[in-house]
Amino acid sequence: MELRSISSMAGGLVLSLCLALPALAQIEMGTLRGNPGSQINVRSQPSTSAPAPSYGIPGDRVQILRSARGTDGYAWHYVEFSKSKVRGWVRNDLLMLDSGNGNPVQRVSFAPGTSAATVNGSVRGYETRDYLLNARAGQRMTVDLRSNSTYMQVAVLSPQGETLYVGTNWTGNLPSNGDYLVRVGLVRAEARRDGAGGFKLNIGVR
């Protein structure tokens, strides 16, 4: 009688635990986002007042380990950097999640028989517009940014997250195979003033 009771209790406990535990989630990944050339604080606690012993740069890839709402009212993510394995807290608005939250990334492809494409857009404040295109080592990329704002700039990041260029017009040889990130945004001072502008960006690869 007692054994049946214990067995029943154990079975109920296991069932309760199974019901309480969520299914194993897929690993959530993300990319740090921000103005070209900026540094993104990685803090010891989920708060803008917490120390920032390290920093990342736009384009750095991270794994999301957990998330929390900070005492400052912001949503925060505790992340691990894919390359350095450094861990810390990054504010939600500085992170683009692969799941689709945050600023979407547009993949650029060329029409048959061509080697360039043109995209149009606009940004305000700290917004950025991100474009991905696949290229091979040794190919030559050209970016040409035209804007009604003198504060607009474009950054080119390698598949490893290294910043290859920040400015308005660039032509350079690509160092590796993979997806290159081309990011358009305002310089930090203008973003802080909540400036805005439209742009036309021509991207070519040969």
Image (cartoon, rainbow, N blue to C red):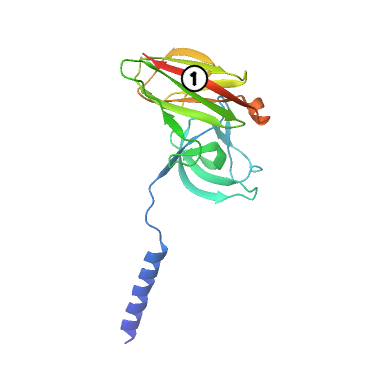
Quarter of the image with the N terminus in it: bottom left
- The three-letter amino acid code for the residue at tag 1 is Leu
**Residue 170, percent from left and from top:** 49, 13
Residue drawn at x 60%, y 46% is 74
Residue drawn at x 35%, y 18% is 137
Residue drawn at x 60%, y 19% is 148
Can the viewer see residue 185? yes
Position of residue 5 relative to residue 204, above or below, is: below
Residue drawn at x 50%, y 26% is 183
* Furthest residue toward bottom: 1
Position of residue 143 relative to residue 6, above or below, is: above
**Residue 132, percent from left and from top:** 42, 27
- Name the residue tied to disc 1: 201
Can the viewer see residue 58? no
Position of residue 118 relative to residue 193, above or below, is: above
Judged left or right of residue 32, residue 108 is left
Give 62 or 104, whichever is nearer the viewer.
104
